Image (cartoon, rainbow, N blue to C red):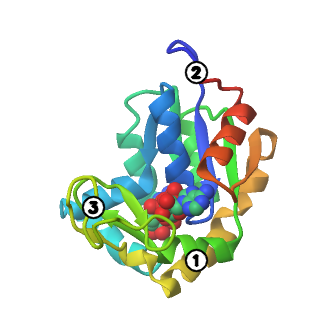
Amino acid sequence: MSEDQSLNLVFLGAPGAGKGTQTKRLIKNFHFKHLSTGDLLRKLIQEKHPLGVKAKSYMDEGNLVPDSLMIDMIKTQMHQKKNIIFDGFPRTLAQAVALDEITHIDKVVFLEVAHQEVIQRLTGRRICKQCGFEYHVEFLPSKKGSVCEKCNGALYQRDDDQEEVIKKRLSVFTSLTAPLIQYYEGKLLRVQAMGTVEDIYQKITQGLGLSS
Ligand code: AP5
């Protein structure tokens, strides 16, 4: 894809489906701007920004942050209108309608994953406080135990990666976000998101007609 082409993508999927993993790979290889609402919210929380303070209680309980806050937040991030990957937004019908008013969406990648797999992926996830690299206690443990192999930063577990909160996030996905699958029917690329990260990435790039 060249810089003068335009492709706006939404990544849809349950918590832990691999939205962040796959979109971060795509932005490394193509000219996309990455807009992850989860990452933006966590940054605001770290900065003790009033919106972050407000959002934290919703996030810690596995609930969605109110639509009005999320839509306003996305509007402030729209410095460009093309070649954007929306990761984790929209998550409700109201957000999808608002996004259609902000910009045109070309394709929606829906990562399909079994909920049992999500629980295993997320309960074992550990993240480096310093560089953000993600480990897994079983599948990808740090050789240095509770510190990062790459930068010696401390590893932490996200507050919402506790099993009970993950279950809540999954039920919120089913009731509020899954209806978007129908909303985006004509634009949907369904991808089975079980298997290796590389195989899933290949399915996505092929499905989107992107070649590295
Ligand atoms: P957000 O940060 O968006 O979290 P999420 O979508 O619930 O889930 P994750 O980021 O955990 O999953 P992911 O699909 O990105 O998977 P990842 O690639 O990281 O949102 C957090 C909270 O913020 C929400 O609950 C809500 O409160 C709020 N929020 C955010 N956006 C909002 C919105 N629009 N409206 C309202 N509220 C909003 O992978 C997960 C793990 O699995 C990683 O450890 C990874 O290494 C591993 N993994 C990935 N792929 C594979 C694979 N193929 N095999 C094995 N392991 C894998």
Residue at 56 percent of width and 64 percent of height: 16
Residue at 22 percent of width and 62 percent of height: 46
Element under label 3? loop
Element under label 2? loop
**In what quadrant of the picture does the N terminus appear?**
top right
Left or right position of 172 against 63: right
Residue 170: name its quadrant: bottom right
Q: Could you say where residue 56 lies in the image, as x and y percent from the top left?
A: 33, 72
Q: Nearer the viewer, residue 131 or 162?
A: 131
Question: In this rendering, does residue 4 appear at all?
Answer: yes
Asked if 18 appears above or below 10 in the picture, the reply is below
The kind of residue on which mark 1 rests is: Ile
Q: Could you say where residue 52 lies in the image, as x and y percent from the top left?
A: 28, 64
Work out whether mark 1 precedes mark 3 in sequence or the reverse, and give the earlier one: 1
Element under label 1? helix
Work out whether mark 1 precedes mark 2 in sequence or the reverse, and give the earlier one: 2
Residue 210: name its quadrant: top right
Q: CA distance from mark 1 to mark 2?
A: 36 Å
Q: Nearer the viewer, mark 3 or mark 2?
A: 3
Left or right position of 47 against 72: left
**In what quadrant of the picture does the C terminus appear?**
top right
Judging by the rendered image, the residue that carries numbered circle 1 is 119
Q: Nearer the viewer, residue 10 or 127?
A: 127
Neighbour class for label 1 at 10 Å: few (<14), some, many (≥20)? many
Question: In this rendering, does residue 58 appear at all?
Answer: no
Residue at 44 percent of width and 39 percent of height: 34
Judging by the rendered image, the residue that carries numbered circle 3 is 148
* Circle number at residue 6: 2
Q: Nearer the viewer, residue 196 or 91?
A: 196
Q: CA distance from mark 1 to mark 3?
A: 23 Å
